[in-house]
Amino acid sequence: MKIGLLGHGVVGSGVSRIIDDGKTWEVRELEIKKILVKDESEMTDERMTLNAADILDDPEIDIVAECMGGLEPAHSFLMRALKNGKHVVTSNKKMLATYCEDLFDLARENNVTVHYEASCGGGIPWMASLDRTRRVDDIDSFRGIFNGTTNYILSRMSKEGSSFLDVLKDAQKLGYAEQDPTDDIDGYDVRYKVALSAVKAFDSVISASDIITFGIRSISADDLAWCREKGLTCKLIGKGAYHGDHISACVIPMFLKNSDVFSNIPMNFNAIESSSGTLGAAVFVGQGAGSLPTAHAVVQNVIDIWKDQDSEINPKFKKPVDNSSCEGVYYIRTEKPEAFSAVCAEKVSDSVLITKKTSLVEIQKMIHDAQDESLFIAEVDSL
């Protein structure tokens, strides 16, 4: 089975290392024929090329593994690979969540598949578990700590009482956070992963832009102090649920009971849970990023294709995201508390309030109308 590898950075180099090491007989059946790199300074192997056509148009290459990141040219490259009848494996959550419908449709037209285990949860076998569960039963819902950067920040802030900016700077120094941390701290990274998890869990393409998303950019030490006083722990949670004719999905900080399994997930670890009628709750915990864990997931998908090339894994349906049935109690810190007077159940201070049980859609509209950039919101699990 011959593979073309697009990108040789953190993940791509891990893929070539695992395949070249060949520790199992399955891996030894794989061969990387060509590796696309960015410039001549990376040309350290005779398999490396600067020309994507050497991979995308080579009839001997069966699988294209994309580890480049970014929207373009990754998207265009994969569309071309699919048109040429090649299976695709990608770790690129943002690109896939943005263009998944086009990619899945094109794959189906050309009798090939798109695999993306590495796009969500790093080396955690999350997508594979959803596939196996759905062979027996429908999945009702899922939730998870999908982002190690924000979990690291919240863990440190909760334990030390440190400020958000101080811990963010430490995370950047350690390589846990990008120099531009927007996707992490504003919840977009989790949003992409929720969208892709919904594809697997509910056999439906959903639009990532329809997922209500709140991040932790505005969180303060005082917010977490209140959380601790109530015997709760703060985590950034992505979740989705199936309602027959529609799907609900959101990303939001949550103040969880300390007895909740997610409350004890430390530092930069991920934890993801699915729920179904016969299996109940199934929880997966592990490293959600890193070169070898993520590369491991890429190689697993390559082996999946090699062992069963005719499998139909791509979704056939598209369903709307509708959060109107999602209700909760919310902690809101804002400079404009009067904007939330209609839903206020308790006034904690001049700037902090607890809402009565309210629709998340209604809360989102109020937040939009308030126009308060410093506002912080968290769903409160229990009081």
Image: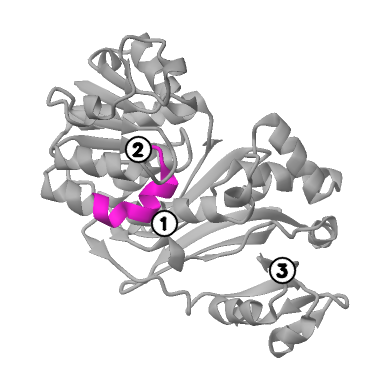
Q: Nearer the viewer, residue 129 or 76?
A: 76
Q: Which mark is residue 279?
A: none
Residue displayed at 59% across by 76% down: 364
Q: Give me the residue at 24% from left, 44% from top.
A: 79
Residue under label 3: 373
From the image, state whether disc 3 or disc 2 is nearer to you. Answer: 3
Q: Is residue 253 visible?
A: yes
Front residue (pair 299, 357): 299
Quarter of the image for residue 380 reads: bottom right
* Residue 39 belongs to the span the image colors magenta: no
Q: CA distance from mark 1 to mark 3?
A: 26 Å
Q: Which amino acid type is shown beneath numbered disc 1?
A: Ala
Location of residue 37 with respect to 196 vertically, above or below: above
Q: Secondary structure at mark 3?
A: loop
**Residue 377's spot in the image, x, y percent?**
69, 67
**Nearer-the-camera pick, 82 or 42:** 42
Magenta stretch in the rendered image: 91-103
Task: Look at the image and tell me whether residue 144 can be seen.
Answer: no
Q: Which residue is mark 2?
A: 90
In the rendered image, residue 96 lying in the magenta stretch gets the answer yes
Dot 1 corresponds to which residue?
195
Residues packed near mark 2 inside 10 Å, few (<14), some (14 to 19) or many (20 plus): many
Side (left or right) of 209 relative to 318: right
Q: Comparing marks 1 and 3, which lies closer to the viewer?
A: 3
Judged from the image, the secondary structure of the residue bearing numbered disc 1 is helix
**Precedes in sequence: disc 3 or disc 2:** 2
